Image: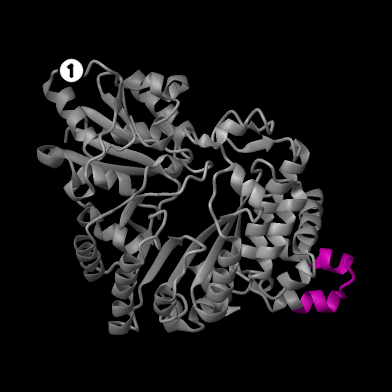
Amino acid sequence: MTILLSTLNARYTHASLGLRYLLANMGELQEQTRVQEFVIGTKTTEIVEKLLASRPRIIGLGVYIWNVEECTKVVSMLKRVAPEVTVILGGPEVSYETAEQEIVRLADYVITGWGDVSFAVLCRQVLHGPQPLMKIHAGVQPPLNDLALPYDLYTDEDIAHRTLYVEASRGCPFKCEFCLSSLDKTAWPFDLDAFLAELEKLHARGARLFKFVDRTFNLNIKSSLKIMQFFLDKLAAHPEDPVYAHFEVVPDHLPDALKDAIVKFPAGTLQFEIGIQSFNPEVQAHVSRRQNNEKAADNIRWLCEHSHAHLHVDLIAGLPGEDIDSFARGFDFLYSLKPHEIQFGILKRLRGTPIIRHTENFHMVYEAHPPYTILANDRIGFADMQRLVRFARYWDMIANSGRFAHTLPHILGESPFARFMALSDWLYAKTDATHRIALDRLAGLVGQWLEEQGISADTARALLESDYAGQAHKKHIVKKAQAENKKAESAAPLRQARHLAA
């Protein structure tokens, strides 16, 4: 083994699609190349020891916003204990603004942008000469049909225990300035028949959980319908062993043909991630986001009322031109549409994104270190931004988790944002924490807050006892949540199962 491909994933269940693309396209070097993944939080010495155990000549490291700080420590240690090993970096975090990054200074080479074929070319030069003269190499973007697909490289262990990431297309035609995909010229589709053949092989090997990384799954409706029909056919043939598919969709583009396919999916088998980000037209214009808000709202409402799709709908706080009152109105409106989860994000300045052009005009202040979260702007001061950060964390723990499904409407009342902000401020004052709050303690605190809002102790207790959170101490509750509607839910993640069981 000469070449080692590695990265630090956010969690074990995430299997790196990027590394497998590199391995699939190594050509004659594939036999001497191996993938070795780690999880963030692993000790640096442990990672380096395992990386060097197989005596690689080259280590390729995938660098992302969530792992760059730990990857920097890994590269630093590698170059101290094994300077003879060539370290090649790639990934979105090192593809832009490379000159100012410590990890780039430490490494031997960096490939920016697409690395699928460029990594193998660089490895050949390192191994066989002539030695590369430049440190930074712009990745070549080949036609997608020229790429070897990586899906055979998912192991049986991956299929049994991890989310399988797949893509029917790359790129995005939209120009939302907070997103790296805004730098793409368009979206490029893979050959659909070849892609579906790969899905067929994965399913035959036992894969049941598929997460599409396409930025705009429903852009080409004919392709979307063929992919959905693939899953519908599997569900019809194996209702006792259902598949689960996750797609990111454009909110204002849901023609009748797509609706007809969506309604055929049973509960627990289909999940949509829908990016709204803001309902404020002025803010949307600032970040070059094209969105028909009326159509988007109608489509979300239709999906909630007429389909079994589980909806994750995204909002971003901190965008240029949006104050808390504007964000609150958008939040309350979105909540009225009744999506299963509202993903409340705080703006991050990803390297290379055009959002930086607003820094001066809107006094945008970001963290200097990953994940470069916004700290303040001209509409939201630092203290209020931190209140929003805490709101987002508590919202995920209480609302999105599905653990407080019956209690949540009583928390939110007629003013969801204002009421939950009040609960968020109260929880922080009581706990001085937004992490590692035991579920039974959190349930007790929610009950106490409800009582302070005028709800009787008996009513608050009854509400919580009707929820997953109020019964978390009982051993049977997880089994019950998974058992209800067993056939429909068996492929769905536990968090979605809790929403379905509510």
Q: Is residue 434 left or right of residue 85?
A: right
Q: What amino acid is labelled 1 in the image?
A: Gln
Identify whether 105 is placed above or below 165.
above
Identify whether 40 is placed above or below 447.
above
Q: Is residue 455 magenta?
A: yes
Q: Quarter of the image containing the C terminus?
A: bottom right
**Quadrant housing residue 4:** top left
> Magenta segment, which residues?
447-462
Q: Nearer the viewer, residue 174 or 469?
A: 174
Q: Is residue 328 left or right of residue 195?
A: right
- Helix, strand or loop status at disc 1: loop
Q: How many numbered circles does the render carry?
A: 1
Residue visible at 77% across and 72% down in the picture: 410
Q: Quarter of the image containing the N terminus?
A: top left
Q: Nearer the viewer, residue 192 or 116?
A: 192
Tell me residue 113's x, y (percent): 34, 35
Tell me residue 228's x, y (percent): 34, 72
Q: Is residue 501 left or right of residue 224?
A: right
Q: Is residue 443 magenta?
A: no
Can residue 204 be seen?
yes
Which residue bears the numbered disc 1?
131
